[in-house]
Amino acid sequence: MNLEEQTEKYVIKLISFKFKPAVVIGAEYNGKRVFSYSKPCDSNMRNSLRNKLRELGDLYIQKNGKGNPIGNCAEVNVSQKLMIGNSTIPLDKIIFSTPIRPRTKQPVPICDNCKHTFDK
Ligand SMILES: [Zn+2]
């Protein structure tokens, strides 16, 4: 099963629990795959990620009053999960699945904050 298929399966599982977060995503690095969703991220994080997010502004606050609050994206949450046990993963080398909105099952474009954070 590829990352996209496995992410779709995760979406179906969440929906079966009647849980529909705004955005769901999968991530992969060096054979390890994890899945997560958008929510305010854990403030305890790897320095590489913290420093990148700090370039945008304060955690949980919108940059210039627009867009997703910093650190709330599915990409950030799934990266934190991926870095558990491996703090040296380069942020630009993380492979993401297509982000999916469970309510509509439609893909969600990557936001400007995440383009900056993960060099996408
Ligand atoms: Zn984002």
Image (tube, rainbow, N blue to C red):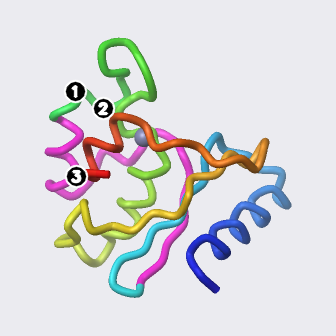
Secondary structure beneath label 2: loop
- Disc marking residue 89: none
Residue range of the region highlighted in magenta in the rendering = 32-54
Residue 118 belongs to magenta span: no
Give, as a three-letter code, the residue at label 1: Gly
Task: Please report contact status of discs 2 and 3: CB closer than 8 Å, yes or no.
Answer: no
Across and down, in percent, residue 13 comes to: 77, 66
Nearer the camera: disc 1 or disc 2: 1
Mark 3 Cα shell of 10 Å, populated few (<14), some (14-19), many (≥20):
many
Mark sitting earlier along the chain (2/3): 3
Mark 2 Cα shell of 10 Å, populated few (<14), some (14-19), many (≥20):
some
Across and down, in percent, residue 25 comes to: 55, 58
Q: Nearer the viewer, residue 1 or 83?
A: 1
Q: Residue at x 46, y 43 (%)?
A: 110
Residue at which label 2 appears = 59
Q: Residue at x 18, y 44 (%)?
A: 52
Mark 1 Cα shell of 10 Å, populated few (<14), some (14-19), many (≥20):
some
Across and down, in percent, residue 39 comes to: 52, 42
Give, as a three-letter code, the residue at label 2: Leu
Q: Residue at x 35, y 32 (%)?
A: 70
Residue at which label 1 appears = 57
Residue 37 belongs to magenta span: yes
Mark sitting earlier along the chain (3/1): 3
